Each structure stands twice: as C-alpha cells, then as structure tokens.
C-alpha cells in the first residue's frame, strides 16, 4: 500500500557506526552490510566489495516513519509536490510517510486516489502511503466510499485540517470501520470554541490582542470521540496533540481500554507560545497552536509514559507569499520533515533511544511495517551525525516551501545518509571547504 | 529611536521626553501662523487600512504644523482593492522615499512587518487589537496636565478590553508612569490571561477607588457575536453615569463616544471629563512623536531589504 518510484537497490557497507535499534536492543558499534537492498549481515569487521560509507562517529538508526504529512498533491503544487516533499522527508531520515487527503480536490474517491498512487510511483523518492477523507470534500456530512477507497489502497481515513464536527457522522464511520478496517485519524478541535483563534489562548494572546484557541477546544472533542470509539469498539488515532488536558483525556480513555493512539509534533515538544510573542513570525502559526510550557512538559511526560504513541511532523508547507502577510492572515502550518529529529534531539527532552523509537512508532498505527535493523529486513536506515551543528534554513530546504518554525535556530544532529526501501535516497551534500 | 511600534519601545524617560516636547508645541496652535519649520522637507506618508477620523487628521495636522509634506493613502479605492499585498503596497510607496510611514491596519503586528519592509521610520497608528501607542501617549499627556503625575494613581479602564488596542497600549503606558491599572468589563470581553498584565474586575463595586475612569467604546457589532446579550444590559451594569462617577474622579474616553451606552450624557458634559483635552493633546503629542523620530537622523538610504516572513 506504499508507493515510490523505482530505486536502484543499494549495495553498501556502513562501517563502524554506532547501531541503535531500540526495539531489538541493539546498541553498539557494528558494521552493517546492505546487499540488493536488504540487510545482509551485521557484525564486526565485515568485508565486501561494495561502496563503503564511513559510519565512524555516527549513529545508525532504523529509518523514521511519519504518519502525518501534507504533500499538497493534487492541486497545491506551488507549496509542495510528491518529489519535493519526499526529498524533504528523505533529508530528515524518513523512510516512509503518510500523506493527508486535504488536497484540491480532496482525496475522497477511488479515481483521485488511484491517480495519486500512480503519480507517487513515478515521483516519490521514498514510500508514501495515503489516507482518504472520512467525509466527502471534508464537508463533514456524507461518508466517502470507504470500502472502495480501502480496496484502492487507502491506509485509513481522516478529515485532517478539520474535525468531524458531527458526532453521528464519526459514529457511522467507526461502524463502517468494522467492515473496511484501516485507521481513523482525527484532528480534534471544536470550532465553536476555537472561533477565529489564531494562537493559543492565554497570557500571550491576551497581551498581543490576538484571538485565542483554548486548550479545551482540543480536549473536549478528544473526550467525545474516545467515548464514541469506546462504544463502537472502533480504533482511532488522535493527531497532533498539543494540550495538557488532551494528554489527560487520552490517558483516561486508554485506561478504560479504548483503542486510541495519538501523536505529538516536534514543534509542540520544543516551542511555546512565548516564541510567537517575540516577533509574530508567521512560521510559528500552526493548528493546533504552540501552547504553554506546562502543556509542553505534559506532552514530553506523555511520550515517556506511553500515553503518546509516536512523533509526527504534521509537515505543512505554504508558499512564501502566503506566509509573508500579517499573522492573522497567514495560513496555519509549519514544515517539519527536515528538522524533526534534530529539533527533538537538540531540545534534550527525551532519551536518544526513545526519540528513535517514537520517530518510527507511527508505522504500525497506520498498518505499516516497522523498520528494524535485522538481517533479512529491507534496508530502511538512517545514518546521523549527532555532533554536527547546523543552522536551519541557512542552506535552504529540500522542501519547496520554507515556512519552517525552526528557521534560524542552531540544531544538533544532521542526517548523513538515508536508505529507504533498500535504495539510497539521501546523501548529505558535501560542501567544499572554503 | 527609529520606529514607534509599541509602548514597549519606550521607557519612562522617553515618554517624559516626548511629552515635555509636546508641551512646548502647544503654543504653535495659538499663533497666527500655525506652523514651525522643524520638519521642512520631510515626507510623511499616512497609510490607513481602516477608517479613522481623528487619528489620521491629527497626524496630518501634526506633520503640517511642523512643515513636513504629507501624503494620505487610503486603502480603499487603491491598488489594495485590486489585491495588492501589504508588502507590495509598502514597497511601492517606499519608492516615493517617505521619511516616515504612519500606518493603521486591522492586523496585529502589521506595523512591525512594515518596519521590516521599508527604510522609512514607522509609527503604529493602530494594529488590530494589539496597540495604539500614540493614543496612550496623548492619554498620559492629558492626565499629566490634569493630575500633575500618574505616580500611584488608580486607573480603571472599563469596557470591551478584548477588542481594544487602546486598552493594551494604555495599560503599558500608565504602568510605566507609575500608575496602578485595573480593567473592568463583562467576563466575555476580558481575555483569559489578562490578569498577567493588570488587575481584573468584572463589576464596578470598587470603582470609587479609582482616581481615573477610562471608558472604552462599546462596539455594536459585539452584540452579534453574543459577547453581551444586549446594549441595554451592558449599560445597566457598566455605564459610567452620574451615580457611578465621583466628583474627584477624572473621566476619559478615546472616542467616538456612544452616548447613553458606555457613558451617560451628564458625565460627558461634566467637568470631570477630559475627553476634549484628549483630542487636543492628540495633535501636540503626535507632533512630538514625529519630531522625535525625524530629527537627528538622516534621510533613509534608498536600498530596500527583502525580509523573509517575520
């Protein structure tokens, strides 16, 4: 159910990297031989007549999987396309991404999904999966043809960008899930509480005179939807958690046995609404908004105790002219694929092994295989130099858009090489010393 | 100082310097020729994206009284109506080499953005619900004239705080001058988080403590969004009238007043009201702001910088 353009199967020997796979417990300096796109051998002092990649002083992790990106195809190719979006993902160490259906037109019918998958087989550098919308045109009123969409390869369903405002519609989708399977991913926000809000409602929005989006806008809908999912026995995934109250709502639902999972984004884990006050940078405008330090700490604690299952970027590219406007007029969203690992790692908020684990933990939630560093597995690997410091945006972006909330910040940890589905999809550009 | 974007750009000393200078300008309006040559040859561009009578005209009068040349650019009927972005408009108008741009927009932070896009100095004449710094300066000026000092004075700002840029700038300015500020109004019209800036009250029970009562305009469109059930109910709970206003309290209002809503007719015409003095102060204070920003600096360099979204 994943699509990408044909790649040359890699034959490489990654020599002397610190291999860390949190799931298998592997955590030592080893050589990894990739032959024909598969992990052929793991050991010490391996020899092979293939290209050698120097892993000395670097870390080799299972590749990252992002369950939440916006690739903007079809219809918004001025923001991103399948090629640039997946190049951006590869540069961030991702070996698979799941694209959202809030495109133009919406991915809400089999023909749109089929042609999109066909395009991905020509253009995507790394494997891409697609979610279809829950309701036709994201209007929140009529269900899509979920069975046919699943047959065409939809990993699941979401109206991301909008909540499923009517409880009865969500209930019907969850009933239909019993027939068709697939995850139902939810953007949780009560529009009657969010109103015209453009940032977190609190001390900072009060000072700036900006309309606020209260935390309860998110948490109340999570509580409602967890109750519906529990009643129907359905499986839901909550997207981009931002508020402390939401973490509490998820923990409560999980304790009742509701089949509910959730994700948090690097920006919500590392930035707060205080950053918005600094200069009203529209790159810091996203939905859900950056919230307070207390919320940020709750998200970090949630990842540590397992309430939050995975990290997802919600990579949301927008063109420069769209963001180069007053804060209230700018569209919501930040890019995040190229900075995901480095932003979380630099913030020093989670143990390294947990970061690595959470950056691919979205895979099984979307019904995808989890990358693993083990002999016989397809090579889905990322080689990272943890000590390399870089300034975000200083050398541009692989993404077509430049609306990255971390722009200008110095981060630690740079992706050196990414191998996805057995092919080398990213190599760090070596710049000649001046 | 290059721009005046927020009261936070000023410390108490700077506020006092500007207001002392404003005082020296009062005699200009008394002269037969109401003009001094202080800013001769300087260009001031008024760029107003929102309707404004007194702010725009007082900026214009202030600039002309200092012999600067003034261009008024109203957003309606211009290229803005044809979809030109703020950035393009500002860069286009910057080609006329203004020394100063006075800008009002309905958007928070727009004046700051404009400052990034032009080599001219920028005065924020109101950016959405964020700030209106020259209003706060003229209010401080008016209070200094009436009370001598703001030090340790109790100032109550009453009304729709949520949608008021005047309130935000005044809170900052009054506090910098040593006053204690309380905002009062319906809980639906005081944003959550306000308590971090000043005292918050939901009724007027403690209003007699105030030395100064500053009433805000109650906008009619607030009714449609259910912020208050009716103007009648608002007036019953929050209107400043003869019963609520004490004999020694000073009454202020940024105008335009809704007679019979936030203020009763009797208090508007009472000796406690300094509403007319506020308007009068508008011209001299804005003269002082223009003087502060435009003297002692050379004409802007022609090179324009293209800024990334800021």
Image (tube, rainbow, N blue to C red):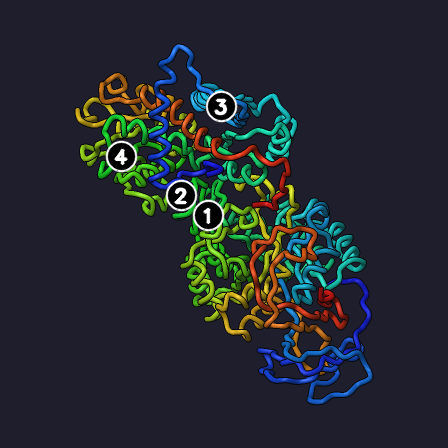
Query: Gap in Å between the C-alphas at discs 4 and 2?
Result: 17 Å
The residue indicated by pointer 4 is: B156
Q: Secondary structure at mark 4?
A: strand
| Closest to the observer, A294 or B123 | B123
Query: Gap in Å between the C-alphas at discs 3 and 2?
Result: 24 Å
Q: Earlier in the sequence, mark 2 or mark 1?
A: 2
Q: Which mark is residue A60?
A: none
The correct choice, above or below, for B27 with respect to A187 in the image is above
Quarter placement of the C terminus of chain B:
top right
Residue A410 can be seen in this image? yes
- Residue A178 falls in image quadrant: bottom right
Q: Which mark is residue B51?
A: 3
Point 44% across, 24% down: residue = B55
The correct choice, above or below, for A126 with respect to B257 in the image is below
Q: Chain of mark 4?
A: B
x and y, in percent, of residue A269 in the image: 50, 61
x and y, in percent, of residue A303 in the image: 49, 67
Q: Are marks 3 and 4 on the same chain?
A: yes
x and y, in percent, of residue A75 in the image: 72, 45
Q: Could you tell me if the residues under marks 2 and 1 are in contact, i.e. CB atoms within 8 Å?
A: yes
The residue indicated by pointer 1 is: A277
């Amino acid at each position: 159910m994943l699509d990408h353009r044909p790649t040359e199967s890699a034959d490489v020997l990654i020599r002397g990297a610190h291999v860390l796979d949190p799931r298998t417990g592997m955590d030592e300096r080893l050589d990894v031989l990739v032959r024909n796109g598969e992990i052929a051998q793991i050991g010490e002092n391996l020899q092979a007549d293939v290209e050698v990649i120097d892993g000395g002083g670097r870390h080799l992790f299972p590749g990252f999987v992002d369950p939440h990106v916006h690739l903007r195809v079809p219809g918004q190719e001025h923001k991103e396309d399948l090629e640039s979006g997946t190049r951006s993902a590869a540069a961030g160490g991702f070996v698979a991404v799941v694209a959202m259906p809030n495109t133009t037109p919406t991915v809400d019918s089999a023909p749109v999904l089929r042609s999109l998958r066909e395009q991905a087989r020509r253009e995507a550098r790394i494997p891409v999966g697609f979610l279809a919308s829950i309701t036709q045109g994201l209007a929140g009123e009529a269900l899509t043809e979920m069975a046919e969409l699943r047959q065409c390869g939809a990993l699941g369903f979401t109206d991301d960008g909008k909540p499923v405002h009517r409880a009865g519609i969500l209930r019907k989708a969850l009933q239909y899930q019993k027939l068709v399977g697939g995850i139902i991913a939810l953007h949780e926000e009560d529009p009657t509480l969010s109103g015209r809000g453009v940032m977190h409602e609190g001390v900072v929005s009060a000072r700036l005179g900006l309309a606020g989006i209260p935390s309860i806008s998110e948490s109340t809908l999570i509580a409602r939807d967890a109750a519906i999912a529990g009643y129907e026995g359905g499986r839901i995934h909550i997207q981009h958690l931002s508020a402390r109250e939401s973490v509490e709502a998820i923990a409560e639902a999980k304790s009742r046995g509701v089949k509910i999972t959730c994700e948090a984004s690097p920006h919500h884990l590392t930035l707060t609404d205080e950053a918005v006050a600094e200069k009203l940078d529209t790159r810091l405008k996203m939905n859900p908004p950056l919230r307070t330090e207390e919320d940020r700490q709750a998200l970090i604690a949630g990842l540590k105790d397992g309430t939050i299952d995975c990290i997802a970027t919600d990579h949301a590219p927008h063109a420069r002219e769209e963001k180069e406007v007053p804060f209230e007029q700018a569209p919501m969203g930040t890019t995040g694929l190229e900075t995901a690992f480095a932003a979380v790692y630099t913030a020093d908020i989670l143990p390294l092994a947990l970061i690595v684990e959470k950056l691919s933990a979205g895979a099984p939630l979307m019904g995808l295989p989890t990358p693993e560093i083990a002999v016989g597995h397809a090579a889905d690997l990322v080689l990272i130099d943890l000590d390399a410091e870089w300034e975000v945006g200083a050398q541009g972006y692989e993404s077509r858009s430049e609306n990255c909330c971390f722009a200008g910040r110095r981060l630690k940890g740079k992706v050196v090489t990414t191998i996805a589905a057995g092919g080398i999809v990213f190599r760090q550009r070596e710049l000649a010393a001046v | 100082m290059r721009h005046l974007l927020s009261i936070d750009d000023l410390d108490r000393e700077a506020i006092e310097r500007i207001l002392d200078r404003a005082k020296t300008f009062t005699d200009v309006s008394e002269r037969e020729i109401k003009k001094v040559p202080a800013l001769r040859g300087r260009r001031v561009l008024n760029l107003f994206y929102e309707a404004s009578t007194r702010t725009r005209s007082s900026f214009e009068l202030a600039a002309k009284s200092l012999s600067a040349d003034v261009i008024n650019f109203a957003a309606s009927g211009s290229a803005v109506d044809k979809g030109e972005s703020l950035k393009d408009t500002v860069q286009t108008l910057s080609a006329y080499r203004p020394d100063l741009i006075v800008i009002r927009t309905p958007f928070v932070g727009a004046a700051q953005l404009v400052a990034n896009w032009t080599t001219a100095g920028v005065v924020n004449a109101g950016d959405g619900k964020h700030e209106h710094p020259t209003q706060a300066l003229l209010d401080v000026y008016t209070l200094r004239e009436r009370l001598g000092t703001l030090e340790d004075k109790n100032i109550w700002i009453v009304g729709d705080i949520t949608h008021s840029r005047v309130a935000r700038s005044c809170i900052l300015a009054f506090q910098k001058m040593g006053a204690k500020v309380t905002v009062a109004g319906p809980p639906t019209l005081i944003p959550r988080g306000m308590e971090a800036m000043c005292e918050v009250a939901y009724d007027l029970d403690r209003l007699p403590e105030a030395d100064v009562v500053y009433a805000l305009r109650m906008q009619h469109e607030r009714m449609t969004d259910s912020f208050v059930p009716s103007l009648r109910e608002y007036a019953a709970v929050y209107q400043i009238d003869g019963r609520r206003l004490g004999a020694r309290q000073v009454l202020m209002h940024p105008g335009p007043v809704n007679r019979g809503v936030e203020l009763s007719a009797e208090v508007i015409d009472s000796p406690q009201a300094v509403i007319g003095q506020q308007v009068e102060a508008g011209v001299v204070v804005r003269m002082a702001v223009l003087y502060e920003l435009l003297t002692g600096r050379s004409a802007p360099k022609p090179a324009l910088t293209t800024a990334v979204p800021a």
